[in-house]
């Protein structure tokens, strides 16, 4: 690396790297230079002119004030940020910024946390010299998430650059010249990018603000707490802004290693679900088909008694992958304490044949921040932007840096980066991977061997193979298995092929854990084949599917909504409906729960309980409860602790969740994330090559009970749309036209939805989302389906 | 009278159909290009000749052309571009238009030579969109040149490639600023880029690019034919060659004149038939609307070259000489100019976006009889807060007229403020 150099800012000697801008050095030194357009994550625009400073080089002063954000340092440079000349330049800019600004701070949501307001305090005049008419700009409707007051815009173009550079979709742009320059969509449209809410934080003024938060509170009424996002496996760090006992809004907390400065819209706006009218606020019991409240004491005694009397092999515990580590740990401890072995949190998985060979602690394979430095990534079965928005952003960075990204998926994706998409039927995904393996001259063993033998690699496979191989020599090739792979009926074989390709190319295999704590389930032992501390279980208990295929007499559901959270909701409804006892610990009431449950226990949701999430890279992120749960609802760990006591089980005497955390942390002290399979993944393909297959994506705002109740997110376009996507040729075969109503049949399960023709879909795929309204009665997320005219 | 007129860019002007290839050939056109193709002249030698000629950029800034070409990483691998700036938006300027109309081949030859020197195999000529006839003429010339095998691939078996394209502007003055022009060619909103990096490192599509004015490029073939020394001697030291002056405003015969740099202003004025109606000369804006105004008396003692005009407190700019006769209201002139800059600011820099509109509004208010005494200092102060604080020179261009008008004609502004909008100049 080039040597450091030294410059002087306001008389202070500062070390700097060649090429660094003055403002970056000043920021590091804590020397405040006012700015609006500069943002450390965006390209330099140097257009606001707020950061003008005086500078000299080699004893020669620059003739004009220079923008600190765009002036690279040079050895011996002297910078004055508060000299009379610098201040006059900064005040000049401030005056210009304010002349056309409405100064409507009292009715502006940004008031109190406005960069313009703050800087104006330091550099603005008391009285305006401007007495002409002010500019008024018409607002635009950007959809349910971002409110606009474009008259307040100061044209810093941060939002525009965000779209172009970070999101990869130019949702906003500048039109018009001079005073008529406008920031807008040009052709009116709603913001749909999964990261678009970040422009609210980027906007230094009140031009772009949060629509759900609009007029709900003033910033100075809010207190700040920290949190961890409860949806995807990134575990974005959050600032929760509270008023009284309410989460009023959510902002990102910088963490370069995890979420940088961003959060997804899902993480930002899902807090709205906390205030849903569906909240369960007291324990309830169903008697003669009617629900009535019941005190905690009563409720827990009844649950304990019935669990104690149930035969252990008849108990099944199903835990949402968004449960905290502490909840997972205690739930499995309770289950296993009762002698049962059926506990699982992989509710959306169908194929568990690989469990015996499952790696001890599957993870991303590389730290999150290193995704962007990969040279080649093969993504198997992942709708990555919907599943893990910020990991998609990291992959975008890799792709823009020249990495080769190849996707094998049963549907085409709208990506924000260049990539090669191998789109095929669900069954065909095996063939695509086998073809890549064959292009690498790999034979494989078991049924993988047959698959590879039958494969016919084309140029596309050869080039994918070569990219991975080239990257492999630098140890920077990565093969990721996503949520659509995990939901695949031949997940085991997809994994097996991934390992074959990885071995042949020197690449790393990585997993995209489905949810906020899917990785934590391995540590907590919330799995039938894994004990706490990621230790392999001696006997493998019934998995999430087996528990439903062979119905139990008693189920404990933890944070689960049966109609939306299972790979096969129809199977779940049948099995749960036939049980003698279903105990549901839940933050929300839901029809599909009330239909099958006997007792509902109200537990704390996101931000209401302390706990820990383990993210995709295996980082433990502990958080505190920021607000109290509503009504009688209690943190889940407390409920489980009391249940443990009432079941007379040892080891449930925790005073606080920290003790649970500590106990588990001790068990996990030696555990390191590890993706090496522990055995062979030898199984036969279960999917027939021919026949129509349902491919059930899980739309971004339908992933868990909280986000499904976040009102604004649900109003975004396409948030909750049930439809059948068909290739036009196939639709013509069955006589269905675009927009026509179709009957969807999966075995006995049936639903109706409108047809959407999409020529980019493989001919044997019916794209039918899961988790959405209308899909409740359907069967397997990925599995055979029949579609006919209604 | 000035003797040696029309010796460089207008050297075909006396011919019938001066724009035709045959006409250009008849004055020795394309001979330099063919010679270079044959002899594979060392680009460094050509650049040295340009440096010797003291050809200064004719687009406004007057930057030495030879020096500019020498900044190009000629032998670096990858695509490089030569771009001609025929946007000609500066009020008062209409010289490039006439090069395109009457001598387009000389520009093509100049661009081809430039491309050769800087290692660019592709050129763009960005022509102001309103120039219907000049665009047609240039396109026709381009076709002739391609058909005659003067440009294209492997030109005359030399192994040298040069393709040239026309790009039409869409009516924005700012697209004449060289980096906004590049953005515009790329299909983006015409906004200047922050420099550095300069176009020679990061230009069109991110590749090394040289941008020159039409007149600068069209001068090159003649410099090579007659030698850098000859060109230098046409003008003055550090101010080589003749230059095109567009003389407009209150003159009897507004026109373009190609005369040696250093020609006394009064001679140029005489060529244009003197001040209209025999009036007294009040003031001159000697280099396009963006430069400071110079009082008439001073101007009559000044010569038309970069250094002399600078000494008179202004700039030669694009060579557009706007003549203002006695009896003209300077407040109105300035209000008109201010309106132009407010309309043409690209809008990205705060001082320019907000300040140009402010200036225009205050000036219009004064014209409407609603001026206040403090407005005059306000105008000066606002202009001072724009100038030198923006990404491109449009901010300076908007500020300098204001400051210079107030410097020389402050009393006219004061009078109008005090007299409810009545003009001192027009009353006299
Ligand atoms: C606002 C603005 C407008 C300009 N318009 C033109 C123009 O119309 N034509 C031109 O040749 N140069 C124009 N320029 C100057 C160019 O940026 C650039 O300096 C010139 O094209 C370089 O060519 P030269 O070195 O041959 O003069 C303009 C500059 C500014 C700041
Ligand atoms: S000075 Fe004006 S025209 Fe030039 S870049 Fe800035 S805003 Fe645009
Ligand atoms: S922060 Fe430097 S110009 Fe905007």
Image (spheres, rainbow, N blue to C red):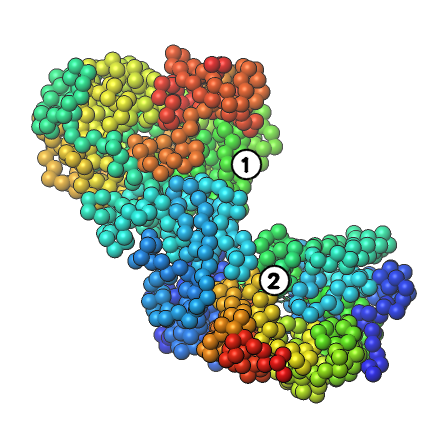
* Residue ID for mark 1: A420
Cβ at disc 2 under 8 Å from ligand 2: yes
Look at the numbered disc 2 and give the secondary structure of its residue: helix
Q: In the figure, residue B325 lies in which quadrant?
A: bottom right
x then y, percent, for residue B353: 51, 63
Crowd around label 2: few <14 · some 14–19 · many ≥20 (10 Å): many
Residue A754 position (above or below residue B217): above
Q: In the figure, residue A158 lies in which quadrant?
A: bottom left
x then y, percent, for residue B151: 80, 55
The residue drawn where x is 32% and y is 46% is A213
Protein chain holding label 2: B
x then y, percent, for residue B296: 67, 84
Q: Are marks 1 and 2 on the same chain?
A: no
Residue B364 position (above or below residue A160): below
Give the alpha-carbon distance from disc 1 to disc 2, as whole Å: 40 Å
Protein chain holding label 1: A
């Amino acid at each position: 690396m080039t040597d450091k150099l030294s410059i002087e800012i306001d008389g202070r000697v500062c070390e700097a790297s060649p090429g660094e801008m003055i403002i970056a050095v000043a920021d590091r030194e804590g020397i405040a230079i006012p700015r609006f357009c500069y943002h450390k994550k965006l390209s330099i625009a140097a257009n606001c002119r707020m950061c003008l400073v005086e500078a000299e080089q080699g004893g020669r002063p620059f003739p004009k004030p220079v923008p600190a954000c765009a002036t690279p340092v040079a050895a011996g440079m002297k910078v004055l940020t508060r000299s009379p000349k610098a201040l006059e330049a900064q005040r000049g800019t401030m005056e210009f910024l304010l002349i056309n600004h409405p100064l409507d701070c009292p009715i502006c949501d940004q008031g109190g946390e406005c960069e313009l307001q703050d800087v104006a305090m330091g550099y603005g005049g008391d009285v305006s010299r401007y007495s002409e008419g002010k500019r008024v700009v018409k607002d635009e409707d950007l959809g349910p998430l971002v409110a606009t007051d474009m008259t307040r815009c100061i044209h810093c173009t941060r939002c525009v650059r965000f779209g172009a550079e970070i999101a990869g979709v130019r949702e906003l742009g500048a039109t018009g010249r001079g005073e008529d320059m406008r920031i807008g969509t040009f052709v009116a449209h709603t913001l749909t990018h999964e990261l678009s809410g970040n422009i609210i934080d980027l906007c230094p003024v009140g031009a772009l603000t949060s629509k759900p938060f609009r007029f709900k509170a003033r910033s100075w009424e809010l207190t700040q707490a920290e949190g961890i996002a409860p949806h995807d496996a990134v575990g974005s760090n959050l600032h929760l802004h509270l008023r009284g006992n309410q989460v009023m809004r959510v902002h990102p907390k910088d963490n370069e290693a995890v979420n940088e400065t961003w959060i997804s819209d899902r993480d930002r706006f899902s807090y709205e679900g906390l205030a849903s009218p569906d909240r369960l606020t007291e324990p309830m019991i169903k008697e003669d088909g009617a629900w009535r409240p019941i005190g905690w004491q009563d409720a827990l005694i009844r649950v304990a008694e019935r669990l104690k009397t149930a035969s252990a092999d008849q108990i099944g515990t199903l835990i949402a992958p968004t449960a905290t580590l502490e909840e997972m740990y205690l739930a499995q401890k309770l289950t296993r304490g009762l002698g049962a072995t059926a506990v699982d949190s992989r509710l959306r998985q169908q194929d568990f044949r690989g469990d015996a060979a499952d790696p001890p602690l599957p993870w991303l394979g590389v730290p999150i921040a290193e995704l962007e430095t990969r040279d080649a990534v093969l993504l198997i079965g992942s709708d990555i932007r919907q599943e893990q928005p910020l990991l998609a952003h990291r992959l975008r960075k890799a792709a823009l840096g020249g990495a080769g990204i190849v996707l094998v998926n049963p549907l085409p994706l709208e990506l924000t980066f260049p990539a090669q998409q191998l789109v095929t039927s669900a069954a065909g995904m095996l063939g695509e991977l086998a073809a890549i393996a064959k292009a690498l001259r790999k034979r494989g063993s078991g049924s993988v061997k047959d698959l590879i033998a039958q494969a016919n690699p084309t140029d596309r496979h050869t080039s994918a193979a070569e990219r991975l191989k080239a990257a492999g020599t630098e140890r920077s090739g990565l093969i990721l298995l996503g949520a659509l792979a995990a939901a695949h009926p031949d997940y085991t074989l997809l994994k097996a092929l991934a390992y074959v390709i990885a071995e042949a190319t020197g690449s790393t295999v990585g997993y995209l854990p489905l949810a906020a704590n899917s990785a934590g389930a391995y540590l907590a032992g919330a799995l039938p084949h894994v004990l706490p501390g990621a230790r392999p279980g001696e006997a493998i208990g019934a998995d999430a599917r087996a528990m439903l295929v062979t119905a139990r007499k008693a189920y404990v559901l933890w944070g689960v909504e049966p109609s939306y959270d299972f790979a096969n909701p129809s199977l779940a409804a049948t099995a749960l409906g036939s049980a003698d006892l279903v105990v549901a610990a839940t933050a929300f009431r839901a029809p599909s729960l009330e239909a099958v449950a006997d007792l509902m226990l109200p537990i704390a949701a996101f931000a209401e309980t302390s706990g820990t999430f383990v993210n995709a890279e295996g980082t433990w992120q502990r958080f505190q409860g920021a607000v109290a749960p509503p009504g009688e609802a209690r943190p889940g760990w407390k409920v489980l602790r009391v249940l443990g006591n009432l079941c007379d089980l040892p080891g449930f005497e925790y005073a606080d969740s920290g003790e649970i955390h500590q106990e588990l942390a001790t068990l996990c002290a030696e555990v390191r994330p590890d993706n090496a399979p522990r055995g062979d993944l030898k199984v036969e393909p279960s999917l027939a090559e021919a026949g129509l297959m349902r491919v059930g994506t899980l739309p971004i705002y339908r992933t868990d009970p909280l986000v499904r109740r976040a009102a604004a997110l649900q109003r975004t376009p396409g948030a909750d749309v049930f439809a059948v996507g068909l290739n036009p040729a196939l639709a013509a075969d069955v006589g269905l036209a675009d927009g026509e109503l179709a009957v969807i049949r999966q075995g006995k399960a049936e639903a109706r939805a409108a047809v959407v023709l999409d020529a980019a879909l493989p001919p044997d795929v019916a794209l039918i989302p899961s988790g959405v309204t209308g899909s409740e009665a359907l069967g397997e997320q990925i599995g055979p389906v029949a579609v006919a005219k209604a | 009278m000035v003797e040696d007129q029309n010796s460089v860019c207008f050297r075909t002007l006396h011919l019938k159909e001066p724009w035709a290839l045959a006409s250009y050939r008849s004055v020795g056109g394309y001979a330099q290009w063919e010679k270079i193709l044959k002899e594979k002249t060392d680009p460094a030698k050509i650049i040295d000749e340009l440096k010797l000629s003291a050809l200064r950029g004719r687009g406004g800034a007057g930057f030495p052309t030879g020096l500019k070409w020498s900044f190009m990483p000629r032998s670096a691998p990858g695509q490089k571009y030569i771009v001609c700036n025929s946007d000609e938006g500066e009020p008062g300027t209409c010289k490039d238009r006439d090069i395109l109309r009457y001598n387009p081949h000389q520009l093509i030859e100049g661009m081809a030579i430039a491309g050769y020197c800087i290692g660019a195999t592709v050129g763009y000529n960005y022509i102001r969109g309103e120039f219907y006839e000049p665009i047609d003429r240039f396109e026709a010339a381009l076709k002739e040149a391609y058909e005659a095998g003067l440009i294209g691939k492997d030109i005359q078996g030399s192994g040298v490639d040069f393709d040239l394209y026309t790009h039409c502007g869409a009516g924005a003055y700012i697209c004449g600023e060289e980096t906004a022009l590049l953005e515009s060619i790329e299909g983006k909103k015409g906004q200047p880029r922050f420099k550095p990096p300069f176009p020679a490192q990061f230009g069109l599509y991110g590749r090394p690019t040289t941008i020159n004015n039409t007149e600068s490029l069209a001068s090159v073939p003649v410099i090579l034919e007659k030698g850098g020394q000859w060109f230098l001697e046409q003008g003055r030291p550090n101010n080589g060659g003749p230059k095109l002056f567009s003389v407009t405003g209150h003159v009897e015969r507004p026109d373009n004149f190609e005369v040696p740099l250093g020609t006394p202003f009064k001679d140029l004025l005489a060529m244009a038939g003197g001040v209209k109606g025999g009036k007294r000369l009040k003031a001159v804006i000697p280099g396009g609307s963006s430069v400071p105004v110079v009082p008439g008396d001073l101007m009559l003692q000044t010569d038309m070259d970069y250094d002399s005009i600078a000494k008179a407190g202004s700039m030669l700019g694009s060579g557009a000489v706007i003549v203002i006769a006695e009896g003209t209201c300077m407040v109105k002139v300035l209000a008109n100019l201010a309106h132009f800059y407010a309309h043409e600011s690209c809008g990205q820099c705060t001082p320019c976006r907000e300040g140009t509109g402010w200036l225009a509004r205050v000036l219009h208010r004064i014209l409407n009889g609603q001026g206040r005494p403090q407005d005059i200092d306000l105008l000066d102060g606002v202009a001072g807060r724009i100038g030198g604080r923006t990404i491109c020179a449009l901010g300076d261009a908007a500020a300098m007229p204001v400051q210079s008008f107030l410097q020389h004609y402050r009393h006219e502004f004061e009078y109008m403020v005090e007299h409810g909008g009545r003009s001192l100049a027009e009353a006299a």
